Amino acid sequence: MVASNHRFRSITELWLGGDHYKWRAMRTNGVPEYLITGSESSDWEKFEAWAATVPYTLRNPLYHWTHLELKTAFGIEKRLNPETAREIFDACNDRLQNDPEYTACGLMRRYHVETVCTTDDPVDDLRYHKQYSALNSQSQTRMLPAWRPDKAMAVENPVAFRAYVKKLSEAADMEIRTFGDFIDALQKRHDFFHENGCRLSDHGMSEFYAEPYTETEIPNIYINVYSGRKLTEEQIRKFKSAMLYIFAVQDYASGWVQQYHYGPQRNNNSRMLAQVGPDTGFDSIGQCHTASAMARFLDRLDSEGHLTKTILYNLNPADNEMVATMIGNFQDGSVPGKIQWGSGWWFLDQKDGMERQMNTLSVLGLLSRFVGMLTDSRSFLSYPRHEYFRRTLCNLLGNDIERGLIPFTGYEEQRVRQMVEDICYNNAKRYF
């Protein structure tokens, strides 16, 4: 969509397509699936169903997000409900269809977006990044890939893993027979991503893996899974541990930032997984005890001199204090905030989750060195979530100032102002 500067046919395609936050709310409000993800309903029917749901989202972040997006993108300050739905639908569509600035690229310009990092598998040829760069060399918005090698660790399903190795072999243009070949192919793709502007990896997993293993075990496990044999739980955990370590060493060698998002329990509804596929709103917060593995993983990298800048994101808020104290164990003075605790993520990227994350970081670390907001929502109108974050941050600090907990005169006033600018912009720009 970005490479072709896609023009959206309607506010429904732009707003509701792929947004499982909204889909979950609609299902909870009694909206049938055909009005959410079904192909048999029209854009207006889907939008009408969403408009009827919005008044029931009071105290849910969707209510604030919805109206921030209407205001900042379209200048619409009316509340969305069944009475205003048609008027708002038509007004948005008129802009989307007739205003030359209301395209995928135009919306990013409207929100002053400087850099977007996408999520890309090692086998991705990055054709759209190349296409965009070639046509938009003077654009104010850079589109850069981010390395997401989850499938290279997914040995639970031997058939799917072997199919992935075949794709990797084709992408790297080399034969893969052994575990050594497998790693060489991944390194080749890692280098290719680096050449195309990638400076960031991202790993999505249920928990951290740091099982002890020998250098001879992993090649044998690879042969077994590639041959189609079902692995034991111990073998799976050892293979994942080895891959997580190898990826981290690659990132360190290339000078990348590595990110770890952990803690979801995915695809809980098997019936809906079969019907509409993954990433459609049927995941939840998981429970895992991963502190020991996280510590062993980071400690091994630190001890060997291979620990690059790292951001940790937990999905279960029960882990807040653990992660906030874990990052302090591996700061080395080389870079301010080298090991980061990422912003409230997924179910936690709302006012309460953000406040809890920032309050805990303030108490147990340095909020001033925080790299700020991340949003992984799938909408071109999602950029006001950064404004939502900024408002939340400023509200926290403003309340402390009013209560006399933070001084706001002279040097300290300038420090507070600089702190806000750093968290919202400068820290991330320097860090990445």
Image: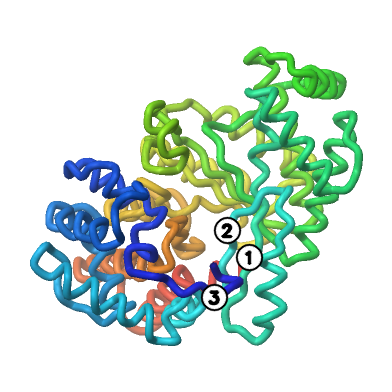
The one nearer the camera, 99 or 289, is 99
Q: Nearest the camera: 230 or 361?
A: 230
> Residue shown at 82%/56% (left/top)?
191
Left or right, 345 with respect to 81, comes to right
How crowded pointer 3 is (Cα within 10 Å; few <14, some 14-19, many 20+) is rated as some
Residue found at x 90% / y 30%: 177
Q: Nearer the viewer, mark 3 or mark 1?
A: 3
Residue at mark 3 to residue at mark 1: CA–CA distance: 26 Å
Query: Is 133 placed left or right of 269 in the picture?
Result: right
Which residue is tagged 2?
337
The kind of secondary structure element at disc 1 is loop
Name of the residue lying farthest toward the left = 83
Q: Could you say whether the residue bearing mark 3 is in a helix, strand or loop? A: loop
CA gap, disc 2 and disc 1: 12 Å
The tag on residue 432 is 1
Query: Few, some or many C-alpha atoms within 10 Å of disc 1 (few <14, some 14-19, many ≥20)?
Result: few
- Circle 3: residue type: Asn
Residue 111, disc: none
- Residue at 73% x, 40% y is 301
Q: Nearer the viewer, residue 426 or 404?
A: 426
Q: Position of residue 233 (x, y in %)?
A: 63, 15
Is 89 displayed left or right of 176 in the figure? left
